[in-house]
Amino acid sequence: MSISCASFAAKFPHVFGERKWKNSSFTPIHLRGSFLLFPHVFGERKWKNSSFTPIHLRGSFLFLNFHTRSCNIPFPNIVSVDSNRTRSCLTMEGQYQTTVACPEANKYQKELDVSVRAIQMACSLCQRVQESLISKTYSQIQSKDDDSPVTIADWSVQATVSWLLSECFGSRNVSIVAEEDVQNLTKPGTAGLLEAVVKTVNECLADAPRFGLIGPQMVLGTKEILEAISRCNSKGGKTGRFWVLDPVDGTLGFVRGDQYAVALALIEDGEVVLGVLGCPNYPMKKEWLSYHHRYYRIISKLTPPTSESWDKGCVIYARRGSGKAWMQPLLNGNKKLEWPNSARPVQVSSIDNPSLATFCEPVEKANSSHSFTSGLAHSVGLRKQPLRVYSMVKYAAIARGDAEIFMKFARAGYKEKIWDHAAGVVIIQEAGGMVTDAGGRPLDFSKGIFLEGLDRGIIACSGAKLHDRIIMAVDASWNSSSL
């Protein structure tokens, strides 16, 4: 026997994954958007009927897309859905064409889906640019006012992500805080660099269908590219919604052919609600993190490629309140992204013995006091050598269980920017870890582009036991430090 919604010619089987319908009161009511709203009573089991595709299992509903029309089946705990908040998305695949506003437990699912796909695209762009920088020339690297390097990848990723978010959610609904300033791209003597950025962005967007997204109908001109970069001019704040983008976090590592990250987060009313970290050079084996990326490029050519290949890269992501963080491999070659793209959950390490723990810190001494963290490590009982890694890959290492501690104590007067931490913080938290300042307080993302009020430094740990020991060690030694 099957239950039929005859007016839409959609039939539903008697058996769902090995569990049967047991409530005869289930009857179709009416069309709502393009999704079938189902009670979450069948559990998270595999569906065996190819005529429909499960999308979300959250809260009281199971959301299905039948690629045509759908109906709504009641449930005692049903929550009303506002059909006026439905917006068509730019994703190509049928099961992601439209997102319906849903219960709190399923909030931000559409934003997360689009973000992961956009970061996959951005990582692909960065890989191509990095190969060019390493094998050819450094002539397309500029310096910002603080002498930090910026490349065509920084501007190209910023333009690409800005354009994708605006097309999907509407430019009026998208506010972005991002690192790069368009003025550095339009000053005298940068015409060749701008031309390279325009070319790189268009090449990336032309590949959008492979990632399940829709690119522009026509090639974007210089004006459109500059407008996309310029839209990233939000100053953040404690109210409203805005995205935070670091197009290439760890640009120094990027130009050296080493570790870097592409980071995107969504902040709402001062709280980070989702984060995505693309780590194109993240090795799949923990031990390889401490070696230079190019060294393993040589080694990889001498050994057969495997699923555990060091240079596969990954995207790690999480949504606030889900209690889970996920990792999926980067899309390589000409493969098409098919959600969830072999994603698997990740969680922090269970190690709480300091002598067994691994701690991360920035590579450059200018970014963090190595002498102070060395003293802390000794007093806490950390015995392993520090893992010095560029960029927010350090956050990814903790979320994935490859390290247990990240400490950063910047020089006096330095202000941490929100784009250097937002995505990593929510990912570690949802993976089971904790991130605070050195006073034990949560990082405050509601004060604009800087982490204002930060107490001395930042400490991220896999668990409370290690975190508490480091906090106590900081308190005991801070007055004798030169920071």
Image (spheres, rainbow, N blue to C red):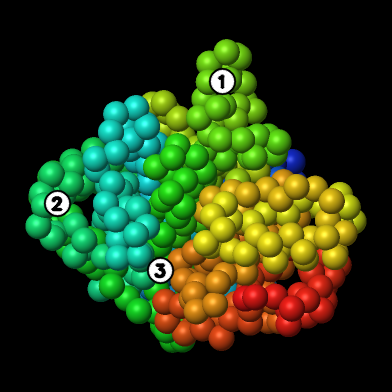
Q: Is residue 116 left or right of residue 306?
A: left
Q: Give the percent coordinates (x, y) of residue 15.
A: 68, 43
Q: Which residue is mark 3?
A: 243
Lower sequence index among marks 2 and 1: 2
Q: Is residue 220 left or right of residue 12?
A: left
Kind of residue at disc 3: Trp
- When the figure is inspected, residue 439 is found, relative to residue 434, above or below; the finding is below
Mark 1, residues whose alpha carbon is within 10 Å: few (<14), some, or many (≥20)? some
Q: Measuring 40% from the left and 62% from the top, which residue is drawn there?
A: 245
Q: Which residue is mark 1?
A: 300
As rendered, which of 138 and 30 lies closer to the eye? 138
Camera-side mark, 3 or 2: 2
Please identify the quadrant where the N terminus is shown: top right
**Do the residues bearing badges 2 and 1 touch, measured as CB atoms within 8 Å?**
no
Kind of residue at disc 1: Ser
Q: CA distance from mark 1 to mark 3?
A: 37 Å
Mark 2, residues whose alpha carbon is within 10 Å: few (<14), some, or many (≥20)? some
Please identify the quadrant where the C terminus is shown: bottom right
Q: Measuring 57% from the left and 27% from the top, which residue is drawn there?
A: 296
Q: Which residue is mark 2?
A: 190
- When the figure is inspected, residue 122 is found, relative to residue 424, above or below; the finding is above
Q: Give the percent coordinates (x, y) of residue 283.
A: 60, 36
Q: Measuring 43% from the left and 44% from the top, which residue is drawn there?
A: 254
**Residue 196 visible in the displayed image:** yes
As rendered, which of 101 and 39 lies closer to the eye? 101
Q: Is residue 432 left or right of residue 88?
A: right
Q: CA distance from mark 3 to mark 2?
A: 28 Å
Camera-side mark, 2 or 1: 2
Q: Measuring 29% from the left and 38% from the top, which residue is drawn there?
A: 138
